[in-house]
Image (spheres, helix red, strand yellow):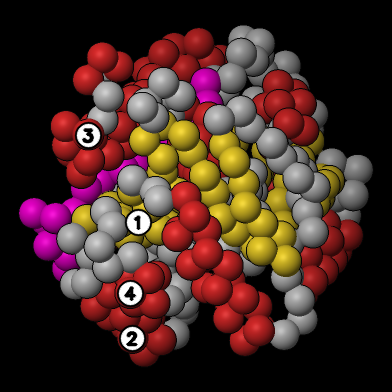
């Protein structure tokens, strides 16, 4: 008999990559996957073997969460899940109380990313405190586990990954830069200024375009668009806004250099970024910010490391263009097979679930 697993996260299904991939690659002979989330009025994304339960969202925050917990409790009583995977640091103690006698995992995909040191310290302490009430805790990286000072004996590393895309072998007759991800607090405008600085250099390669796909608050989006205009790059840089998962292949096929840019702060230093793995598994060399987690992944054959400022970004762009013919997109893909989602689910997530459920997982499907 299949074991039922419930993934809990406030974001609508299909808009959190990790959980979408868990649902896609978990063995459907072993597990029936459920997902409980808010309906954020985004286009619905369906996936075989995943039953999504939506909680309507209103303008009243307190009412939203009261209804969320009420309907979650009804679902828990109805379905009798074998294991619950809570991907959040919001209200973890309430979730734990609702599931006192059920196997439950608290999964931490991120530490706090605040730039205020006091807020950062307080919120990370709250995350760490919450883990005390969970027997099973999973986390995104060893460095984040150490930053939060979590118990190694009860903490499982389930890393980030990406899909290996069947993109064509890259050539570099044109340079087509690509950034995908959040716009908020990432300072992506600095990469545009850096591109502008490079293009003004005497021997700059001029056949360059830059596609930016992502989402952010209105002020962050305005800052990005204003920078494109002020730098005179409207003919080279395009901000496309948010795209659905099935619309992204076009950009990974078209572009040939990925941009994994984020601030060099303590909070981001231990925070792996999905986009880095996505670029590499699409066969794209990358310009990546000099953070601990990026350094753990990046090799010379994968691209260039940059500091988080326009001048150094321009220098890294110059290097990657100057030596562009040394990059082999098929070799990059093959070298990064361990980061494929299907392998992470098979080698990390499923064994972890089996260790919690024990012999209750169907033996004939192991």
The residue that disc 2 covers is 122
Q: What residue is drawn where x is 36% and y is 27%?
A: 1
In the displayed orientation, state which residue is furthest to the bottom. Answer: 118
Few, some or many C-alpha atoms within 10 Å of disc 2 (few <14, some 14-19, many ≥20)? few
Q: Position of residue 128 (x, y in %)?
A: 25, 73
Q: Disc 3 designates what residue?
A: 360
Instruction: Please indicate, yes or no, whether residue 6 appears anywhere in the rendered image.
Output: yes
Q: CA distance from mark 3 to mark 4?
A: 24 Å
Calculate the distance from the C-alpha at mark 1 to the C-alpha at mark 4: 16 Å
Q: CA distance from mark 3 to mark 1?
A: 22 Å
Q: Please state the extent of the stretch shown in magenta in the rendering.
A: 145-164
**Do the numbered discs 2 and 3 sit on residues whose CB atoms are within 8 Å?**
no
* 2 and 1 marks in contact (CB < 8 Å): no
Mark toward the viewer: 3 or 1: 3
> Whole-percent x and y of residue 293?
34, 48
| Residue 118 in which image quadrant | bottom left
Is label 1 in contact with label 4 (beta carbons under 8 Å)?
no
Q: In percent of the image, x 76 and y 50: which residue is there?
A: 242
Sooner in the amino-acid sequence: mark 2 or mark 1? 1
């Amino acid at each position: 008999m299949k074991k039922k697993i419930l993934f809990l996260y406030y974001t609508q299904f299909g808009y959190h990559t990790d959980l979408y991939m868990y649902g896609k690659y978990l063995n459907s002979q072993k597990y029936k996957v459920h997902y409980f989330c808010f309906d954020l009025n985004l286009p619905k994304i369906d996936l075989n073997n995943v039953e999504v339960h939506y909680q309507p969202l209103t303008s009243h925050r307190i009412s939203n969460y009261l209804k969320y917990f009420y309907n979650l409790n009804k679902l828990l009583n109805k379905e009798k899940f074998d294991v619950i995977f809570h991907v959040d640091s919001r209200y973890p103690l309430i979730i734990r109380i609702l599931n006192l006698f059920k196997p439950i995992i608290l999964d931490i995909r991120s530490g706090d990313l605040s730039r205020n040191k006091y807020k950062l310290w307080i919120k990370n302490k709250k995350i760490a405190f919450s883990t005390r009430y969970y027997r099973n805790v999973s986390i995104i990286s060893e460095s984040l586990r150490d930053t939060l000072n979590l118990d190694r004996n009860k903490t499982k590393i389930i890393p980030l990954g990406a899909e290996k895309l069947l993109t064509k072998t890259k050539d570099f007759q044109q340079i087509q830069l690509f950034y995908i991800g959040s716009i908020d607090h990432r300072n992506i405008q600095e990469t545009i200024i850096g591109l502008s600085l490079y293009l003004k250099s005497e021997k700059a390669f001029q056949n360059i375009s830059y596609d930016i796909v992502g989402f952010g608050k209105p002020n962050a989006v305005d800052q990005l668009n204003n920078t494109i205009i002020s730098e005179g790059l409207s003919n080279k840089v395009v901000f496309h806004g948010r795209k659905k998962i099935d619309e992204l292949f076009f950009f990974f096929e078209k572009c040939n250099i990925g941009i994994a840019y984020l601030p060099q702060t303590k909070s981001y230093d231990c925070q792996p970024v999905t986009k880095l793995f996505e670029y590499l598994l699409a066969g794209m060399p990358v310009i990546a910010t000099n953070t601990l987690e990026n350094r753990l992944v990046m090799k010379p054959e994968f691209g260039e490391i940059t500091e988080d400022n326009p001048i150094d970004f321009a220098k890294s762009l110059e290097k990657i263009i100057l030596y562009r013919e040394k990059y082999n997109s098929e070799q990059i893909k093959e070298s990064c097979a361990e980061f494929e989602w299907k392998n992470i689910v098979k080698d990390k997530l499923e064994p972890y679930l089996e260790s919690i459920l024990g012999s209750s997982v169907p033996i004939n499907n192991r």
